[in-house]
Structures are given as C-alpha cells and as structure tokens.
Amino acid sequence: MRVFEVDLNIPTAELLRYYRGTASCVVTTDRFGRRIRFPAAALRAFVTAFGVHGRFLLHVDEHNRLNRVQLL
C-alpha cells in the first residue's frame, strides 16, 4: 500500500461542480510534486460549509485504487 500526502483547499463553489456532476475527479499535487487524481466522492465525509480544507493522506492499493482518505 502506498500513501500520498496532499494539501486540499477546495472552496464551496468548486465543490458544487462535483455535486452537479460536471466534475468527477479531484486533481492535486502531493508534497513531492507528483500529480494525484482521485474520485471527488471520497471527500464527502470532509465537506464543511466552507468546502474541503486540510492536509490529507490518500492510501492506495497496488493497483493505484484509492482505499482510504485520512485527515491529518
């Protein structure tokens, strides 16, 4: 299992794109500069009135499938 550490600052207005279906994936960069893409639905548990903000660990399996998202 691999783990990627990312900082996310997604405002509420941008999150609406995911809920409306015009965007399905989040694309970000980890702390080593690697581009990471994962399903936006994985962030539902972390959505607040202000969006999604914080440092997260993304746990992926050997096939690069997202297993777990953890807020640090």
Image: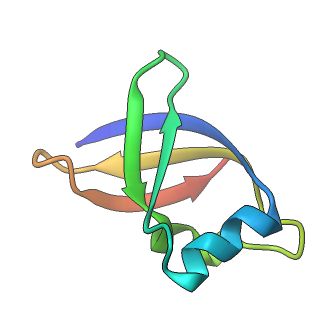
Q: Residue furthest bottom?
A: 20
Toward the right, the furthest residue is 50
User: Is residue 35 or residue 57 the one in the foreground?
Assistant: 35
Q: Residue at x 12, y 45 (%)?
A: 62
- Is 55 drawn above or below residue 51 in the view shown? above
Instruction: Give the total number of marks visible in the rendering.
Output: 0
Query: Image height check: is 69 above or below 61?
Result: below
Occupied quadrant, residue 43: bottom right
- Left or right, 10 with respect to 62, comes to right
Say which residue appears at 62% left-offset and 71% top-offset. Answer: 17
Q: Measured from the top left, where is residue 59 in percent x and y?
A: 36, 49
**Residue 21: percent from the left, percent from the top?**
49, 80
Quadrant where the N terminus sits is: top left
- Left or right of 26 on screen, residue 34: left
Q: Farthest front residue?
A: 22
Residue found at the very far left of the displayed protein: 63
Q: Position of residue 5 (x, y in %)?
A: 52, 34
Q: Position of residue 28 (x, y in %)?
A: 52, 38
Which colouring convention does the figure follow? rainbow
Residue at position x 19%, y 50% from top?
61
In-front residue for pair 4/28:
28
The residue lying at 58 percent from left, 84 percent from top is 20
